[in-house]
Amino acid sequence: MKTRRDKLKKDVLLLFKTCTNNLDRMTLVDVVQRLGIEHLFEEQTATALTDIHRSEFNSSNLHDVSLRFRLLREHGLWVSPGIHIHI
């Protein structure tokens, strides 16, 4: 059981390392949170969210915008509530 857990943890770590698209990274952080295993990946989550916060974000998809807003705000990163959606 322990070896399976370690393998799955390595798989998730590999996902954090290989995800370069911000939307994929936001989705990965969201899934890790929803599974309740965020405590195992605190450093990777913090790094991913800091990178997402610093990067340019333009999306017309309400789901993408709201996911970014929620994740960043939950982790104490300031995001303006006046973000405009370009439709």
Image (cartoon, helix red, strand yellow):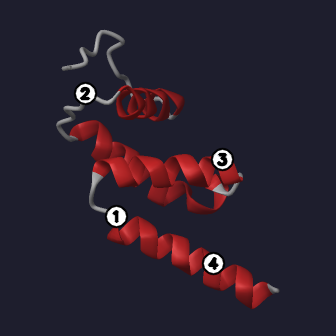
The correct choice, above or below, for 59 with respect to 79 in the image is below
Give the mark, 4 or 3, whose residue is nearer the N terminus: 4
In terms of depth relative to the viewer, which is nearer, 8 or 50?
A: 8
In the rendered image, the vertical position of residue 15 relative to residue 26, given as above or below: below
Q: Are marks 2 and 4 in contact (CB under 8 Å)?
A: no
According to the picture, the residue beneath numbered tag 3 turns out to be 34
As drawn, 48 above or below 82: below
Nearest to N terminus: mark 3 or mark 2: 3
Q: Amino acid at mark 2?
A: Ser
Which of label 2 and label 4 is nearer to you?
2
Q: Which quadrant is home to the C terminus?
A: top left
- Tell me which numbered mark, 3 or 1, is placed earlier along the sequence: 1
- Kindly identify which residue carries mark 1: 19
Q: Tags 4 and 3 in contact by the CB under 8 Å rule?
A: no
- Does dot 3 land on a helix, a strand or a loop? helix
What is the spatial separation of the Cα atoms under label 4 and label 1, in whole angstroms?
Answer: 17 Å
Q: Residues within 10 Å of mark 3 (few under 14, many from 20)?
A: few
Mark positioned earlier in the residue sequence (4 or 1): 4
